[in-house]
Amino acid sequence: MSKESIVDASVPSAGRVYDYLLGGHHNFEVDRRAGDFIANLAPFVTKFVRLQRWCLRDVAYELATVRGFDVIIDFASGLPTQDNLHTVAPQGTTIIYSDYDPVVVQYAREILGDTPNVYYFEANARRPEELLNHPDVLEILNGRRNVAIVCWGVGLFLTDDEIRHAAQYLYEWTDGQGCWAFNLQGAGLSRSHPAGAEILDTYAKMGSPAYVRSQEEYLELLKPWRLDDKGLIALLDWHGLDASEMSDIDVDQFGSAGAGYGAYLIK
């Protein structure tokens, strides 16, 4: 995958297009054109990206307030805007964000300012060891491995080998109480629908090829992690929504679950 940069305004960036579809302002005209093109092909995509981001609020509440984790490590965070983890987690929760683009990291640090206990580092979600072995992260954690891990909205852009590597590394790194919140992004997307194929081609041209998988394919790659008793949660179910939010065309392209599931993975 090419290393796109948030400051390159000559070609659309998948991250900036995502921000635009969320209703954000950290994007250029080239991104807005790409986002409009995608939304014209599949109108539900604007709800899809919002569903993914809304779920992060639930994830933060579940991990910090319900399950009691006071450290959350988030991979491939993007810009910390639009209702991200630190806006929901209780005061005193340590949040460690990361992204592979150094410009995103710099911009994110400006957005966060001096927000207490919230950090942002440059690291690639494809290689979680980069973040977890960062000297500053080691100092923050001080040997702690009973932490919550989050990978949300990135699975669609990781290869099978990359997911398999991350799963194995994180399983071995966390202690027995660790939990991994993972978004089975794109599970349910049609691989053959003409509009879906055109959207996938658009992302490939941005330098961010997408890999569509079924639930079963995702879960196989995520082993040895296993689902907790909540099981797979359809994106539509996180906020009590239902298929009435989707037209017949939406269901045909995205599947009845809203193009993805969330899961809390445990050992």
Image: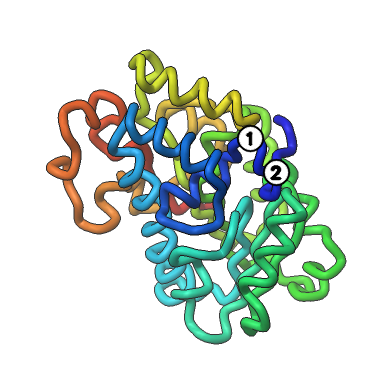
Helix, strand or loop at label 2? It is loop
Q: Is residue 62 left or right of residue 224?
A: left
User: In this view of the protein, which residue sits in the foreground, 128 or 265?
Assistant: 128
Q: Quadrant of the N terminus?
A: top right
User: In this view of the protein, which residue sits in the foreground, 111 or 124?
Assistant: 111
* Badge 2 amino acid: Asp
- Residue 127: x and y in percent read 74, 44
Q: Please name the residue shown 68% across and 63% down the image.
A: 107
The residue most toward the left is: 244
Kindly indicate the quadrant of the structure image that contains residue 223.
Answer: top right
In the rendered structure, find residue 142 and report the number of the disc placed on it: none
Q: Is residue 125 left or right of residue 181?
A: right
In the rendered structure, find residue 11 and report the number of the disc placed on it: 1
Q: Please name the residue shown 47% across and 37% down the image.
A: 33
Q: Disc 1, disc 2: CB below 8 Å?
A: yes
Kindly indicate the quadrant of the structure image that contains residue 56.
Answer: bottom left
User: In this view of the protein, which residue sits in the foreground, 148 or 5?
Assistant: 5
* Badge 1 amino acid: Val
State the separation of the CA atoms marked 1 and 2.
7 Å
Q: How is the image coloured?
A: rainbow
User: In this view of the protein, which residue sits in the foreground, 91 or 141?
Assistant: 91
Whether residue 168 is visible, yes or no, is no
In the rendered view, tell whether residue 263 sits above or below residue 223: below
Q: Please name the residue shown 72% across and 49% down the image.
A: 100
In the rendered structure, find residue 8 and report the number of the disc placed on it: 2
- Residue 34: x and y in percent read 48, 34
- Residue 144: x and y in percent read 71, 71
Helix, strand or loop at label 1? It is loop
- Category of crowding for the residue at label 1, using alpha-carbon neighbours closer than 10 angstroms: few (below 14), some (14–19), many (at least 20): some
